[in-house]
Every structure is written in C-alpha cells, then in structure tokens.
Amino acid sequence: MKKNNIYWGMIFIIMAALIVVNGLGLIEGVGVWSIIFTVLFGAALLDGIVRLQVTTILFSLAFLAIVWSEQLHIESITPWPILFAALLGSIGISMIFGKKNKKWKKDYSGGNHYYSNNSSNEGKYFDENVNVEQDSGEVVTCESKFAGTVKYITSNNLKKVYVRNEFSGMSIYLDKAKVPSKRLEIEIKNSFGGVEIYIPANWIVENELNCSFGGYDEEGTKAPDNDYALRPCFDAPKPNELTKFIKKLIQIRQNSDALCNGSYRNVVIQNHQLIFERCSEKERILVTVNASDSPYTAWHQELNG
C-alpha cells in the first residue's frame, strides 16, 4: 500500500471520529463542515510542506482562513481577495525559484523512478510518495487530488484520455502508446494544479484548451521527418543558379536607398501576383512577383495608385 494512501486514509478516519465527537456535543461552537474542511485543508497543508509544494501550501492556508474567517475577524478579505492573493503568490514564487531541482527518468519494466542530472543522487531510487500507475486500456482516465501522480499509458489502441487533476501535480507519459486511428482526444480538467503530458515527437498537437487564472504551453523538439526534411543541412556551401540569383538580389538591395530606407505600399495583391512599391527621396522601386505560369500585365493606373 502506498504511503500517500495511508496518509489520506488516516485523515478521513480522523474526520469521521471528529464528526462523531461533534455529534455527541463534546465540541461546542464548531459546525460539521468546519471540522471537515479544517481537517482536509490542514492535511493538505502538511502534505504541501513535506513536499515543498508552494501552491498547495498557500491555497490550503487561504481555504483555512476562509473557514475560520469569522473567528479570526478577517471577513473583509475572504473569500476572493485571499484566494487571488494565494494565486498571485504561487505564480510569483514559482517564477522566482522555478521548479525543484529534482529530475528523474522512468523504468518501464517496473514503473520506477530514478534521479538523473543530480550529482548527489545520481542513480538512486526516487519515490517521494508519488503515485505511479500504468494503464493499457483504450479509454484511460487519469485522476489525482492532493497528491503527486505519474501515469504511464502503454495502450496498443488508445482512443481517448480523460485527465482530472485538483490541487496536484500530474505527469502523463504517452510515448509508448499506439494510436492506430491516427487521432487521439485528450480531455483535461485541471484546478489549482499542474499537468505535464509527454507525447512522441512526431505527433501533431491541435490545442483547444481554455484557461482561466493559469497558463499552458507546448515544449519539445521537432521530429527529424518534419520541418528539418524541408530545410536540409549542408556541411559546406553548394553554389548553383538559385544561390547566384539570391546573391544578386542581395547586392541590389544593399545598393538601393529605397529598398533599405523607403516607404512601403502594396500595389497589386492577388492569388498568384504581388507588386509592392518602395519609395524614398532618391528613388522609387517596384518589386513584382508572378507565381503563375502565365504572363501577367499590370496597367499604368495600378502602378501609379
């Protein structure tokens, strides 16, 4: 049994005991919901302190302040001001200190984690109460609340992934998953937490996320069969007719006052033709591009505006 499950199991047992004690009238002036939320957010606070998770710490304190706002006489700053302050504080501290300097690599054979890029712990087993799970189904659900979760999805016919994350950090690895249909939908609902999804380099992402009080981005390297194939790399220059023509155009531009410093005006813009004007006090130049196989005639009225 995972340590994290034991911890939260004990928390719920404590909540149950306190509710019974409160029902017997042994705790005066405290409602049932106050007990539940106090124990719940108090446990989250301790968990955040142990894991050094700033977001969990700040939001747990904020929710505890909301629960006891009347007793603490801080109604003027609850609930939204203190929640907004916790959000700004989390963002600010994350920007200043960044992520923890703990990186790990995965071992698919057992779902284990090991330190890497860390001189003092290189090669040592890394658990830190992270829930490590593996799933090979066609439709996979990833859920996490008040805990760190790592999910390895190794399905041979993956169709859809549901992600539900609250007050947690979650990492999902799809680099071993296979999608025969060539299309995979990932539905993400994330509240006060962070979700990282690792996908194969050759996957194309269509981002349709909506975000409030947060952010999202895409990181990674392009696959060798994508953009790089269109822009081959040469160890040494290989002059040809095209490079000679480009060199001539560069020389024309360098020696032209209009092309370097002149104003810009579009003269003709069509599907296959473009004519634009660069004009300075010294000269006027018209640049023409015809991407069609057929000749094109621009009339005098067009060229003079």
Image (spheres, rainbow, N blue to C red):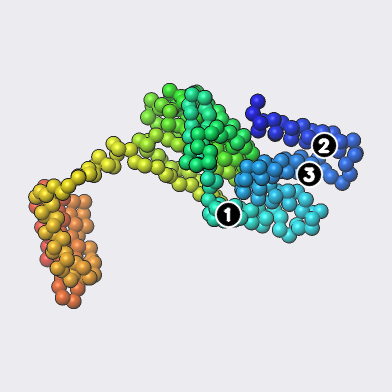
Amino acid bearing label 2 = Leu
Q: Residue furthest bottom?
A: 281
Q: Position of residue 257 (x, y in %)?
A: 18, 71
Marks 1,2: beta carbons within 8 A: no
Residue ID for mark 3: 34
Cα distance between the residues tagged 3 and 1: 29 Å
Cα distance between the residues tagged 1 and 2: 35 Å
Disc 1 secondary structure class: helix
Q: Is residue 247 left or right of residue 158?
A: left
Circle nearer the N terminus (1, 2): 2
Q: Position of residue 162 (x, y in %)?
A: 52, 33
Characterize the local packing of mark 3: few (<14), some (14-19) or many (20 or more) Cα atoms within 10 angstroms. Answer: few
Look at discs 2 and 3 and give the one toward the viewer: 2
Residue ID for mark 1: 93
Characterize the local packing of mark 2: few (<14), some (14-19) or many (20 or more) Cα atoms within 10 angstroms. Answer: some
Residue ID for mark 2: 18
Residue 195 in sight: no
Circle nearer the N terminus (2, 3): 2
Q: Residue furthest front?
A: 120
When the figure is inspected, residue 265 is found, relative to residue 273, above or below; the finding is below
Q: Is residue 93 left or right of residue 199?
A: right
Cα distance between the residues tagged 2 and 3: 11 Å
Amino acid bearing label 3 = Ser
Look at discs 1 and 2 and give the one toward the viewer: 1
Circle nearer the N terminus (3, 1): 3
